Amino acid sequence: MRIRTLAAGLLAAGLALTACGKEGAPSDSGSGEGNGGDGNAAETLSYEVAQDVTLEGSPTFEKMTNRGGPIVGVKEDQPGLGYKDPTSGEYSGFDVEIARMVSARLGFDPAKIEYKPVPSAGREQALINGDVDYYVGTYTINDERKEQVGFAGPYFVAGQGLLVSADNEDINGKDDLKGKKVCSVSGSTPIQRVREQGLTEDGNIVELQTYSQCVNQLAQGQVDAVTTDDAILLGYAAQEPDNFKVVGETFSDEPYGIGLPKQDDALREKVNDILQEAMDDGTWQEIYDATLGQSGNEAEMPTIERY
Ligand code: GLU
């Protein structure tokens, strides 16, 4: 029931943003206003672009400077976090706003960001290849990944949860998954956890490239549950509260980091400073309130983990 209410709230909030996109804006610089309400929270958020930023010893910063803006890896199918509006082509969500804020504080106009959708399984390689300068997309910081990429953050902590059909009464937590078909995504921590903890039989694990593909399978009755971070699942439930619900307690900690090229310590330090400042000056809270916070959930600001 509680989740239903949250989902409905998120939906209503989305509609409210469409209706009055200019009100309650965190920083009303005005630049993003007046271009038609498409329900995109980004219309209410704008960031002052830092002037004369320099960053010694950061090859990635140099690339961004020479190009005149960053290439940012994102998700495009995760409403509330990283979502590309199929009609307007606009990106929105908590992760996208974090990406924009970081760009502005690095001295690059967020309007100049080139977004590159990269699914979970492609993140490390995209950073290693230099296809993206940084990645913001529900990317859990862990030691295994740190062998290949760098992380600034965390800027948010999610937890693994379950999405099922609204009329499902059998699955109420991770211990109810045996014998059930469970969908998750290649290269993600949740699918790894399903396997390691044997939450269902190997033959019942459906592994796809994106969570929206899993949600489609759930809608068609081809799988019984989708598992990943609660923040992601709540976004899908909010879009279709009559069809889906999020059930049970979360069963992991997923600290979200900004993925960076591994060797670029100077950029990692700088982005950590930026995240810390955004938490201290209220910007983080404004971003949260305009995106994930629309669900009515409160979130704690995490402690930046410098290494
Ligand atoms: N946060 C988890 C991960 O990084 C799941 C979400 C995702 O796949 O992006 O693997």
Image (tube, helix red, strand yellow):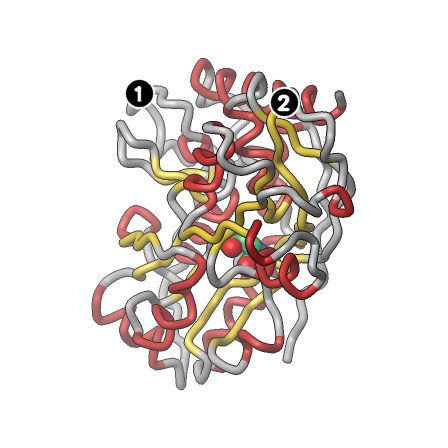
Specify whether 270 is left or right of 91: right
Can you tell which of label 1 and label 2 is closer to the viewer?
Answer: 2
If you read the primary sequence from the N terminus, does the residue marked by circle 1 or circle 2 appear first? Answer: 1
* Circle 2 residue: 166
Quadrant of the displayed image that contains ligand 1: bottom right
Specify whether 68 is left or right of 252: left
Crowding at dot 2, Cα within 10 Å, few <14 / some 14-19 / many 20+, comes out as some
User: What amino acid is labelled 2 in the image?
Assistant: Ala
Residue projecting furthest to the left? 67
**Closer to the camera in the image, 105 or 75:** 75
Label ID, residue 36: 1
Answer above or below: position of 300 versus 153.
above
Residue 234 percent location from the top left of the image: 60, 34
**Closer to the camera in the image, 193 or 38:** 193
What is the quadrant of residue 26 in the picture?
top right
Residue 39 percent location from the top left of the image: 42, 23
Q: How many marks?
A: 2
At x 52%, y 22%, the residue is 240
Dot 1 beta carbon under 8 Å from ligand 1: no
At x 33%, y 52%, the residue is 117
At x 67%, y 65%, the residue is 196
Residue 268 percent location from the top left of the image: 51, 74
Distance Cα–Cα, label 1 vs label 2: 34 Å
Crowding at dot 1, Cα within 10 Å, few <14 / some 14-19 / many 20+, comes out as few
User: What amino acid is labelled 1 in the image?
Assistant: Gly
Residue 179 percent location from the top left of the image: 67, 45
